[in-house]
Image (cartoon, rainbow, N blue to C red):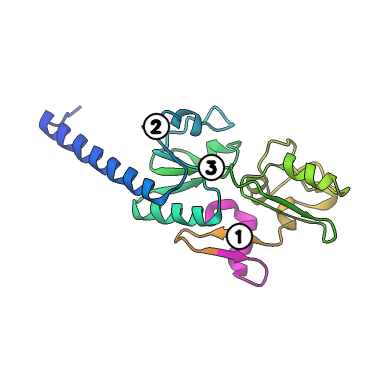
């Protein structure tokens, strides 16, 4: 196999180091919770529930608000990086290689609000079904959950949502009323049947690939 001259290898490595340092400075300026591959906590931060997936992203981000997600998506676009959203990592294998992506872990977005009168729940992107069921049970209700309390609500629901109650009450995705989504160009949109209906139906039927 052809090996480039030593001086060329050094020059290439130096350029890569400079690019990496510039990117890190950019991230620090955004004031986001980001762990990079040179940080001590990176090995734990990149780990998915599915341990068969050996994820090696250059950065792992932990947004706490929708505005954080907007900043993250905008930053990734400016750096030519993809954004790989991942709740719990049960389906991590489907992401494939993410060495050119920022792994977004919404585990700190865990708000849960249940409206017993409307029989509705509003949940954050990092909420698991166990948290929803616990909140709903206080009102004698239950959600269309999966087979494990550790499964994330968003990934499971937007991936179809076939659980124990589906035969009687339908797929979980069919009960979604609205979604707050950040698009690939960094726009925060509220989508439902009347607002951005095409995107709403695409999200409900196609998972997180659209935002």
Q: Which residue is mark 2?
A: 39
Q: Is residue 174 left or right of residue 197?
A: right
Task: Left or right? Give the position of 148 relative to 190.
Answer: right
Which quarter shows the N terminus? top left
Say if 66 sits above or below 38 in the image: below
Q: Which residues are magenta?
A: 189-211
- Distance from disc 3 to disc 1, alpha carbons, whole Å, reads 16 Å
Q: Mark 3 falls on what kind of element?
A: loop
Q: Main secondary structure of the magenta part?
A: helix
Please check the rendered image and state whether residue 34 is part of the magenta-colored stretch, yes or no. no
Q: Is residue 205 magenta?
A: yes
Residue occupied by mark 3: 105
At label 2, counting other C-alpha atoms closer than 10 Å, the crowd grade (few under 14, some 14-19, many 20 or more) is few
Find disc 1 in the rendering and name its residue.
Answer: 180
Question: SS class of the residue under badge 1?
Answer: strand
Q: Closer to the camera, 68 or 11?
A: 68
């Amino acid at each position: 196999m052809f090996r480039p001259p030593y001086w060329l290898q050094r020059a290439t490595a130096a350029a890569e180091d400079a690019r990496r340092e510039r990117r890190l400075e950019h991230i620090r300026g955004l004031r986001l919770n980001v762990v990079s591959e040179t940080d001590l906590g990176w090995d734990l931060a990149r780990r998915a529930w599915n341990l068969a997936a050996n994820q090696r992203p250059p950065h792992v981000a932990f947004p706490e608000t929708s505005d954080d997600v907007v900043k993250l998506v905008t930053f990734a676009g400016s750096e030519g990086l993809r954004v790989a959203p991942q709740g719990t990592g049960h389906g991590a294998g489907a992401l494939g290689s993410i060495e050119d992506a920022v792994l977004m872990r919404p585990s700190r977005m865990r708000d849960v609000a249940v409206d017993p009168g409307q029989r509705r729940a509003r949940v954050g992107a990092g909420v698991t079904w166990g948290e929803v069921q616990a909140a709903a049970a206080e009102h004698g209700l239950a959600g269309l959950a999966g087979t494990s309390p550790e499964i994330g609500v968003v990934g499971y629901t937007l991936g179809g949502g076939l659980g124990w109650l589906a035969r009687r009450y339908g797929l979980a995705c069919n009960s979604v009323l609205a979604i707050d989504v950040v698009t690939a160009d960094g726009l925060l949109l509220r989508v439902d049947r009347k607002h951005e209906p095409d995107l709403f139906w695409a999200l409900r039927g196609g998972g997180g690939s659209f935002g």
